[in-house]
């Protein structure tokens, strides 16, 4: 039995979204958006690297190109699992592909059913191994518990919780992420949306899949430690020139409180607080939920184009959609 099997059992599964990489037409616009959002945006070899303050991990990179487009995903695996994944992919007849231009060649490169390039690479587990931080103001007699506006801290997310990918066939994509990559279904709503966790322990979803006509990045979601941080983040983004979005609200599937901020390309960055957590090797009771439960318990009305895949409309992502309704 390998070290990994002793530590993690005979599981063979991806443990983290190690990094997602996408292009935009204007890196300056991206720098402004994600800096305003509260991320630590660094220059790196002509690209932008997205970090969270106080955390060593690089969660994402943004490169310059004509359009906004999700380019590839790098998924983290344990070192001991690399040869096991190689065998599994071969057994399942999954072809290896060349690394996309600009990507590292290490690990295993394959394509998901939507044609998205996916890298399996050895990495430290960056997905959480315990429930996310929850700061609740303590009970305090004869004193106000609200933070004062004058002393309110800007919101700075703690870590990447999950990404939501568009897919032309959610059921096929779900089977691929289950059968080839070892993720497990948390919840779904028919063939419209599916939420997947890692059996090594992760938030309720580290990857979610939503129906569209093709691939794309709908949103990245960033954990914040309090409901105040969600509200303050929403406010700081309005002040930075990003008033469009959805929320404050609460999801049913995943349970998190949310505010989605619309980015300049018609996709979103989400502040997420208090998402459900799936402990390592535990059994989450996956279920198929009615459509009305697939989005929210409460919150403002959904923007009409909330699940529209702007990556399939090149002319819009080329110019930015920030000022369109
Ligand atoms: Fe989300």
Image: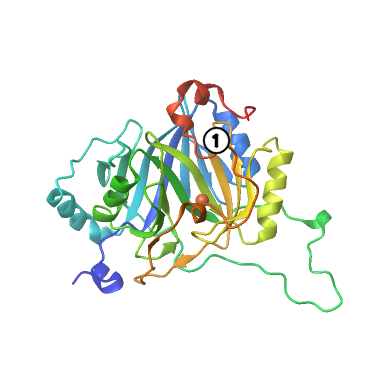
Q: Which residue occupies the extreme right position in the image? A: 142
Q: In the picture provided, is 298 more to the left or to the right than 191?
A: right
**Residue 23 % position (x, y):** 46, 31
Q: Quadrant of the C terminus?
A: top right
| Residue closer to the observer: 263 or 190 | 190
For the question of whether residue 296 can be seen, the reply is yes
Q: In the picture provided, is 137 more to the left or to the right than 317?
A: right
| Residue closer to the observer: 281 or 17 | 281
Local secondary structure at mark 1: loop
Q: Residues within 10 Å of mark 1 (few under 14, many from 20)?
A: few
Q: Which residue occupies the extreme bottom position in the image? A: 141
For the question of whether residue 55 can be seen, the reply is no
Q: Which residue is mark 1?
A: 305
Residue at image location 15% in from the left, 54% down from the top: 87
Dividing the picture into quadrants, the one containing residue 149 is bottom right
| Residue closer to the observer: 232 or 49 | 232
**Residue 292 % position (x, y):** 51, 53
Q: Quadrant of the N terminus?
A: bottom left
**Residue 138 % position (x, y):** 72, 74
Q: Can you tell me whether the CB of the residue at mark 1 lies under 8 Å from the nearest atom of ligand 1?
A: no
Asked if 14 appears above or below 26 in the picture, the reply is below
Residue at image location 59% in from the left, 30% down from the top: 29
């Amino acid at each position: 039995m390998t070290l990994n099997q002793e530590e993690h059992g005979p599981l063979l599964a991806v443990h983290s979204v190690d990094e997602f990489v996408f292009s935009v037409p204007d890196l300056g616009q991206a720098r402004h958006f994600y800096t305003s959002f509260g991320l630590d945006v660094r220059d790196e070899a002509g690209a932008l690297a997205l970090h969270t303050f106080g955390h060593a991990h690089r969660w994402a990179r943004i490169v310059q190109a004509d359009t906004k487009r999700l380019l590839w995903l790098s998924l983290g695996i344990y070192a001991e699992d690399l040869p096991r994944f190689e065998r599994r992919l071969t057994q399942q007849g999954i072809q290896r592909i060349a690394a996309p231009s600009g990507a590292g060649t290490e690990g295993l490169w394959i394509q998901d059913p939507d044609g998205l390039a996916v890298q399996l690479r050895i990495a430290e587990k960056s997905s959480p191994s315990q429930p996310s931080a929850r700061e609740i103001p303590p009970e305090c007699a004869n004193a106000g518990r609200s933070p004062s506006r004058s002393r309110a801290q800007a919101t700075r997310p703690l870590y990447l919780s999950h990404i939501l990918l568009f897919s032309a066939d959610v059921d096929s994509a779900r089977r691929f992420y289950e059968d080839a990559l070892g993720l497990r279904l948390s919840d779904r709503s028919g063939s419209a949306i599916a939420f997947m966790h890692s059996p090594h322990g992760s938030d309720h979803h580290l990857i979610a899949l939503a129906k569209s006509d093709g691939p794309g990045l709908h949103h990245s979601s960033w954990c914040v430690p309090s409901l105040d941080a969600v509200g303050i983040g929403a406010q700081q983004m309005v002040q930075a020139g990003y008033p469009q979005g959805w929320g404050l609200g609460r999801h049913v599937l995943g349970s998190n409180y949310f505010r989605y901020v619309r980015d300049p390309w018609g996709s979103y960055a989400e502040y997420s607080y208090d998402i459900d957590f799936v402990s390592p090797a535990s059994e989450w009771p996956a279920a198929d939920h009615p459509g009305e439960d697939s989005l929210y318990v409460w919150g403002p009305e959904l923007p009409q184009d909330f699940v529209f895949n702007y990556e399939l409309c090149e002319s819009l992502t080329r110019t930015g959609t920030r000022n369109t309704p």
